[in-house]
Structure formats: structure tokens, C-alpha cells
Amino acid sequence: MKIALLGYGKMGNEIESIALQRNHSIVLKVDESNADTFSLEALQNADIAIEFSTPHAVIKNITKCFEAQVPIIVGTTGWYDHFSEIEKKCADKNGTLFYASNFSLGVNLFMKVNSYLAEIMNKYESYDVEMEEIHHIHKLDKPSGTAITLANQIIEKLDRKTKWSISEKENTALFIKDKREGEVPGTHIIKYTSEVDDIEIMHKAHNRKGFALGAVIAAEFLKGKKGIFTMNDLL
């Protein structure tokens, strides 16, 4: 496949390395230095685009891919409030979008454990639950997209939590403590606490390779497909 990389930071570099190892080619790299010259014509040289940019650029990048009829993989988070708008554009343009808050296989297995644990804990009301997420200092959105996905899974299964919050602790809100430290790729910790004990699950990424590999596999999965897809479709 001929791949366009929309966002060429550390993740873009990692994706490029893995894509080349899997016999794909990179035909376009877009970052802050050349974003002003990013054209439909350049994009149309690609079979697919992989997008890891910033929340303020992602909507424009997705829309441009729909216009160019180039399928797009989106790893950027912080744009989901605009999902209905993107969903309509995808349908109108007969486009192809694969999005995920996290492309790591390990994280997606962790999500399944999280959902199952929340379902079990629903009847044990003596346990409260909180989350902590830790990412590198360059990450712009708080909490992380992965943390929001995990929180929504808990809220869906746990009757005593109706929303999540990063600002205050209250009985019906799942509190998410967000930290930004150094170059941490991503750590998510979920803890159930009672007077007598704690139950804790954690996923800790060692590097960006798992995220990058998942994005390239998603690109391979999309070949010949139309519509909107997630990691559930891939797995």
C-alpha cells in the first residue's frame, strides 16, 4: 500500500518504520512544517492515510480524505464531540474511516477485562472506583481518549456511576486523575477500593510500537471497505 502520514511526530516515525517492514511505502508526510501546502492532489497519490496529528487539525484532515476518496485511519483523540458531523460527511462522500482511542492490542484486551470487571463489581456497592491515566507532556487532550473509553465502559456496567469527571470527586461520578509526565507512552490504572481491600488493574505501555503496529494492521484491514470501523471490527 502507498500510505500518507498525516502527522509526522514520534508516532508518525514509528508507523513509518513498521509500514516499511511490512512492505508498504510512504508517499506523503504532513506535519506543521508543510501543512499549508497539503493538497488534495498530493493526498490522491496514496491508497490510504494514517492520521496522528492534533485535535485542532484532525477534522480538517478527515474531511480532506473523504473529498479525495482516500480511506483514513485516525489515532488522534479529542474530536469525538464532532463524531455525528464526521459520520454524516463519511456517508455523504461514501468515505472510509477507521478510528480508535487506542490501537494497541494489549489496551483493547485490557478494555475487555475492564468491562467484565465492572459488570462483576456492579453488585458490590461497598467498592468505589477511580481511574488514573499518565501520558507524556506533549499530549494535548485531558483525559486521554483511552481513559474516556474505559470510563464509559465502567459507567455502562456500574449502576452507581452515571458520568466521569476530572475536576471533582462525587458519589455518582467516576473520578479520573490525569497526569502528564516526561515521555510516558501511556499508563491507565483502574482501582476499586473498599474499607477492607483494593482491587486494581493496570495497562502500561513500554513504547509506541504497539500503537503503531495496530494502526498499520488497521490500514491493511480497510482495503476495499467503505463506512466507519473500530477496533471491535478488526478484532
Image (cartoon, rainbow, N blue to C red):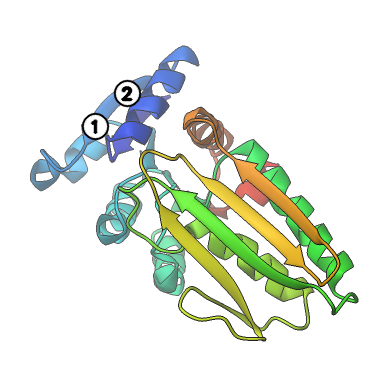
Q: Residue 231: x and y, percent?
A: 62, 47
Q: Looking at the image, which is closer to me, 29 or 173?
A: 173
The answer to whether residue 106 is left or right of residue 94 is right
> Few, some or many C-alpha atoms within 10 Å of disc 2 (few <14, some 14-19, many ≥20)?
some
Q: Quadrant of the N terminus?
A: top left
17 relative to 83, above or below: above
Residue 57: tell me if it is visible: yes
Looking at the picture, does residue 141 appear above or below residue 98? Answer: below
Q: From this viewpoint, which residue is outermost toward the front?
A: 196
Q: Are marks 2 and 1 in contact (CB under 8 Å)?
A: yes
Answer few, some or many: residues within 10 Å of disc 1's Cα (few below 14, many 20 plus, some between 14 and 19): many
Q: Secondary structure at mark 1?
A: strand
Residue behind mark 1: 29
Q: Which mark is residue 134?
A: none
- Nearest the viewer among 59 and 94 is 59
Residue 153 placed where, x, y %? 69, 66
Residue name at image x 77 percent, y 75 percent = 158
Q: Residue at x 45, y 78 (%)?
A: 167
Residue 184 coordinates in the image, percent (x, y): 44, 40
Work out whether 158 lies above or below 78: below
What's the CA distance linking mark 2 and mark 1?
7 Å
Identify the residue under disc 2. 26
Q: Amino acid at mark 2?
A: Ile
Residue 188, image x, y percentages: 59, 51
Q: Is residue 207 left or right of residue 13?
A: right
Q: Nearer the viewer, residue 35 or 187?
A: 187
**Can residue 233 be seen here?**
no
Residue 89, by quadrant, is: bottom left
Going by the numbered disc 1, the residue's amino acid type is Lys
Query: For the residue labelled by badge 2, is the local secondary structure a helix, a strand or a loop?
Result: strand
> Going 35% across and 53% down the picture, which residue do you hit?
66
